[in-house]
Amino acid sequence: MKDREFKAYLQGSMKKGENGHLEKIRETVAGCKEIMQRQRVHEEEKRTGFWQFLSDVFRFEGLSIFGLQAGVLILVCLQIGIIENVSNYIPAFTTLFALAVMPVLLRSQFYNMGEMEAVTRASGAEIILAKLILAGAANLVCITILFCLIMHLENLSESMGQIVLYGLVPYLVCMTAILRLIRLRRKERIPFCIVAPISFWFCCGISARAFPQVYEPSATGLWIILFLIFAGFFGKEIALIRKMRKEGKQYGIIG
Amino acid sequence: MELSVDRLTKHYGRKIAVDCVSAVLKPGVYGLLGENGAGKTTLMRMLCAILESTSGEVFLDGREVTAMGADYRDLLGYLPQDFGYYPNYTAKEFLLYMAALKGIPRDIAGKRTEELLDVVGLNEAVTKKIKTFSGGMKQRVGIAQALLNHPKLLILDEPTAGLDPKERVRFRNLISDYAKDCIVMLSTHIVSDIEAIADEVLLMRKGKLVAQGSVSELTKKAEGKVWELTVSEAEASRWQEKAAVANLRHEGEKVVLRILADAKPVEEAVPCVATLEDLYLQSFNE
């Protein structure tokens, strides 16, 4: 019986009933309400899938993810016109894009939300994976724009392949380091998680001036080896997140 | 529904935070009492499967909870003791964010957020940012997020901390109402809260579960061991040194002491009805 029909039936009964029955009917109404409340609680509720979850994360985190990447892109673009040997600075530029992902990835630890988020259906691994997908998409767009701009504005002696290697290797190093630090370090060590990638970025900047030979065409082999190594580490870390997500485990140390 | 805790143990190096705790929990309100460092929070974290136990397991209807993964978390509502919040979110945005993490579809999340903000008495602060909230208001947002997914197992670590008396009463009514079909476990230092709503009390001491039972069952243990004695102020301070004084009340120039002792401490002492607080103090005075 529908709610409205049920209510009308009970009201009808109340009008018909003698005064002595009113109390009984009130009790029945209260009892029915309670039963309905219980039924509502026990109803199997639908849960969103990963893509809906990703869209929800985008709704809440998208602006900060894409905003930070856009901010870094503008900053880097302003530098391109000023500095010499732009290709030597590509590692520092792409590391900066990876650093801009950090506030989003470390946000829950920073604001002490990790414990509360960890007991949700999504789990820590799924939240990190969703943020990484969004941040990766933003990185891909911004770094592509950067490469196109560099190739277009500067008369570089390096090939597109070299430029991509200079950009990707430090990016992969930085992202792998950030993910490993989040996974293995306690939240009290957040400052270390921040300082380590920043130090790496600083080293990339220094290497542009101090070790120009690293950016010679003859060093391309070294870059390819480094790329393969760090792509392997990064891939392993992503595979681990995916596995943890599948098993519904946490990513990082919560308690 | 039945949650079984089987010899759950947690070691932090040499320190034993939780020592072989076993219990069977059925729908109802369970109050977890214990002094600071007794292992309440560690136990709750293990029940939530966010902290790995050193040994022992937790089963929900016969299924090991860590193996249940998202299915278990779907049934779980948790309010941590020290929780943070994203300061720039409004109460509504925060609850919608938590609803998204709990996998609640947007249309249902919107309705439920409004309902819960009303239930916890924050309907007038919906659009205010959480950073502008008082401690009690933040606590109420925390309680609301724990209830978002209609959990079957609700674990609340110090939920009444920071709530004013009126809000505590509102919270107690909410939980009593909620616990008809669910397992609710809450820890608090406010013994009167547990006395008012808990169907069963779990008393923890140094990581061990030292007592379990209803409030009346437990208070029976302290019966005949609680005495009231009216003395002068000078005598009162002497009594405080030599006996376990649960309470001290000034009545004119005299002081009324509530003393916990296995035998009548002096002839003038009058036996009185034991409360849960007496049992609590007695357990921790041993």
Image (spheres, coloured by chain):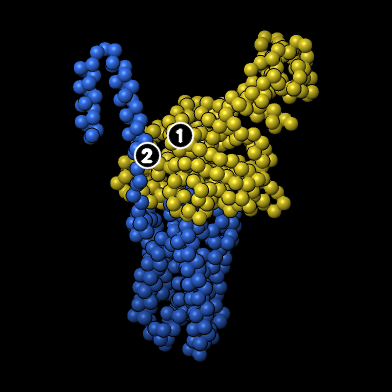
- Disc 1 sits on a residue from what chain? B
User: At x 79% / y 19%, what residue is drawn?
Assistant: B238
Image disc number at residue B179 = 1
Please give the residue where the numbered disc 2 appears in the rendered image: A41
Residue B139 in the image: state x and y as whole percent: 48, 37
Indicate whether A84 appears above or below B188. below
Furthest residue toward bottom:
A218
Residue type, label 2: Val
Return the chain for callout 2.
Answer: A
Q: Of all residues shown, which one is farthest toward the front? A: B62
Q: Is residue B199 visible?
A: yes
Task: Please name whichever residue, B21 or A115, is drawn nearer the observer in this view of the structure.
Answer: B21
Q: Residues within 10 Å of mark 2 (few under 14, many from 20)?
A: some
Chain A on-screen colour: blue
- The spot of residue A81 in percent (x, y) is 39, 75
Q: Determine the secondary structure under disc 1.
A: loop
- State how many labels appear: 2
When the figure is inspected, residue A67 is found, relative to residue B150, above or below; the finding is below
Helix, strand or loop under label 2: helix
Query: Horizontal and vertical percent for residue B73?
Result: 46, 49
Give left or right: position of B273 versus A219.
Answer: right
* Callout 2 and callout 1 share a chain: no
Q: CA distance from mark 2 to mark 1?
A: 11 Å
Which of the 4 image quarters holds residue A5?
top left
Specify the colour of chain B: yellow
Amino acid bearing label 1: Ala
